[in-house]
Amino acid sequence: NAGVTQTPKFRVLKTGQSMTLLCAQDMNHEYMYWYRQDPGMGLRLIHYSVGEGTTAKGEVPDGYNVSRLKKQNFLLGLESAAPSQTSVYFCASSYGGESNQPQHFGDGTRLSIL
Amino acid sequence: GDSVTQMEGPVTLSEEAFLTINCTYTATGYPSLFWYVQYPGEGLQLLLKATKADDKGSNKGFEATYRKETTSFHLEKGSVQVSDSAVYFCALRAGRRALTFGSGTRLQVQP
């Protein structure tokens, strides 16, 4: 079972460069999420999607854009990378929006901005 | 807004010791509560959950009880193993909002 797959696993960028992180899930989940994980701060929600073609802002959306053109994919874009965006990024998905629905996580993308 | 507070780590225990990781929360409505575990280099895995007051979630020897009166969801295990070394996250989800996470507690179990 693949579950939630993130690519790439590691990336180093220079300030000002752009890149896209890809998240794919094979569980037919409606909801998908992007989080960033920083030391001592837990996970913070960047953007999320409640279905194909929809996106919404989370807690820390500035500097990021997202797209959900297909139900199984959720892309996170950095248009002009900044050192403050150095972090570990996690994608997650859930079957629905009810509070009892757990989220399933990918293994993360470690991103360093120089 | 919603928030989760976990005890600071790291927590260092000897193998077979008793584990408690404290978690308290603030939320509007009636949240579901979760514990996730993150092993080195991996993503978060759901460890257990409880969806209403007095529910007990359990998995792999870990337990946590949803205490509405004290707004707590403490994680316990009677006898830890070296393989339990990981970072543990308490989280809540209220209504259709996304998960709110605590800052995580690192557990180190020594042989």
Image: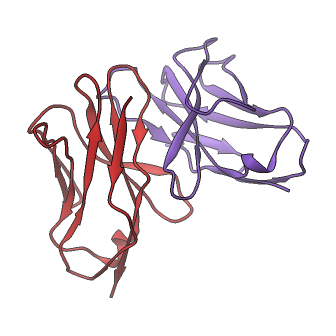
Chain colours: A purple, B red
Indicate whether A25 appears above or below B81.
above
Residue B96 horizontal/vertical position (percent): 38, 19
The residue positioned 65% from the left and 43% from the top of the image is: A6
Q: Is residue B28 left or right of residue A57?
A: left
Indicate whether A48 appears above or below B23.
above
Q: Nearer the viewer, residue B81 or B1?
A: B1
Residue A85 horizontal/vertical position (percent): 73, 46
The residue positioned 17% from the left and 55% from the top of the image is: B63
Q: Nearer the viewer, residue B78 or A80?
A: A80
The residue positioned 66% from the left and 19% from the top of the image is: A68
The residue positioned 10% from the left and 38% from the top of the image is: B69
Question: Splitting the image into 4 quarters, where does residue B52 fall?
Answer: top left
Question: Splitting the image into 4 quarters, where does residue A19 fall?
Answer: top right
Question: Splitting the image into 4 quarters, where does residue B67 fall?
Answer: top left
Q: Quadrant of the C terminus of chain B?
A: bottom left
Residue A84 horizontal/vertical position (percent): 74, 48
